[in-house]
Amino acid sequence: MVLVLGIESSCDETAAALVDGEGRIVAQRIASQDAEHAPYGGVVPEIAARAHAERLAPMIEGVLADAGVDLADCDAIAATAGPGLIGGVMVGLVSAKALAMASDTPLIAVNHLEGHALSPRLADSSIGFPYALLLVSGGHCQILRVDGVGQYKRLATTIDDALGEAFDKTAKILGLGFPGGPAVERVAKDGDPSAVPLPRPMVGSGEPHFSFAGLKSAVLRAYESGNHTASDLAASFQQAAVDCVVDRLRIALESMDDVETLVVAGGVAANATVRAALEGLAADHGMRFAAPPPALCTDNAAMIAWAGVERLGQSDPLDIAARPRWPL
Ligand code: KG4
Ligand code: ZN
């Protein structure tokens, strides 16, 4: 049985997982640092790196024990090598290198974005290439054409904020705390999505790129007017964001006639309104729609282990560097 150990530490989730060749998650543990970062209203890189350093080793021992295996049973150790907060990435990558050296197991340095990009195939092995991918997380907002492992064509990106960042900033404006995306979604359930007139930046543009800075500023102005409830503001923001995403994807899909599957991945893919809108868009285009279960949308190590399974046979040198920036 193929078995890959995955390690994730690029932002504020410390995670380890064991995934087999069929995409079964044999064991996984994940520790969120929400409580540590909440007082600051965002992720503090030094606090994140320290928390990863404290938690990772016992977590790796934990997943091996949960599965009743040891490192020698693993075919590869896959670790996020970037992009992300460099201190955290180094903690995970250095740990993986040490374990790879000690156990004479191949190291696979995984691009975190590739982890997200391939995560739908971990959740559902029937998803084949090519697919159109909306990758929406706290740091990234892209539309990609995925033709195979390592074959990514970026069709659109954001000219300012990522979609997750826009959710986080809206949550901050509304005083909903951190992390922002799930809080905005929760509060929006009680609001009217058409209550607050908000802009839809880039909608109508012939290029499929995103922009969310203007939307966030409009939320701030509407909030400061004192005329709206937090629920209406959250619901209206969420609707405006979803309208932007659907319009941008519509443009991008024009150049992907031969693609039959639309996939969404990354933390914002956990949002039910986003998922429902994309499902509708896919149906309009006669496309199949796929999204990983919410727990595999936000950062996790199972997707990193799975990227390792997809890349099995490859091995990276033990002096490979951690990369704060690493485009797909
Ligand atoms: O993929 P992820 O866990 O980390 C990065 O690689 O960035 O994504 C985190 C982002 C955050 O901005 C968070 O607010 C957003 O995903 N997010 C959500 C939801 N859950 C997480 N945004 C909207 N609705 C959600 N339910
Ligand atoms: Zn991520």
Image: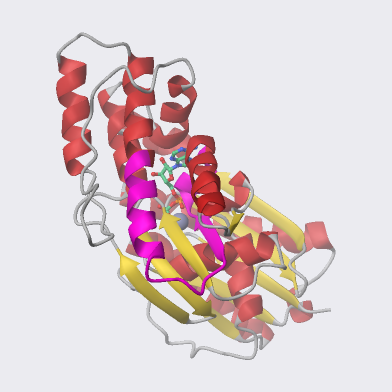
| Residue drawn at point x = 60 percent, y = 83 percent | 311
Q: Is residue 152 above or below residue 31?
A: below
* Count of numbered badges drawn on the protein: 0
Q: Nearer the viewer, residue 105 or 307?
A: 307
Q: Is residue 67 left or right of residue 252?
A: right
Give yes or no for residue 273 being in the magenta stretch. no
Instruction: Answer with the quarter of the image where residue 36 lies.
Output: top left
> Residue 110: x percent and y percent?
50, 75
Give yes or no for residue 265 being in the magenta stretch. yes
> Residue 141: x percent and y percent?
34, 56
* Residue 211, visible in the rendered structure: yes
- Ligand 1 in which quarter: top left
Q: Is residue 212 left or right of residue 50?
A: left
Instruction: Answer with the quarter of the image where residue 252 lies.
Output: bottom left
Residue numbers of the magenta segment: 243-271
* Residue 43, visible in the rendered structure: no
| Residue drawn at point x = 38 percent, y = 23 percent | 193
| Residue drawn at point x = 32 percent, y = 11 percent | 229
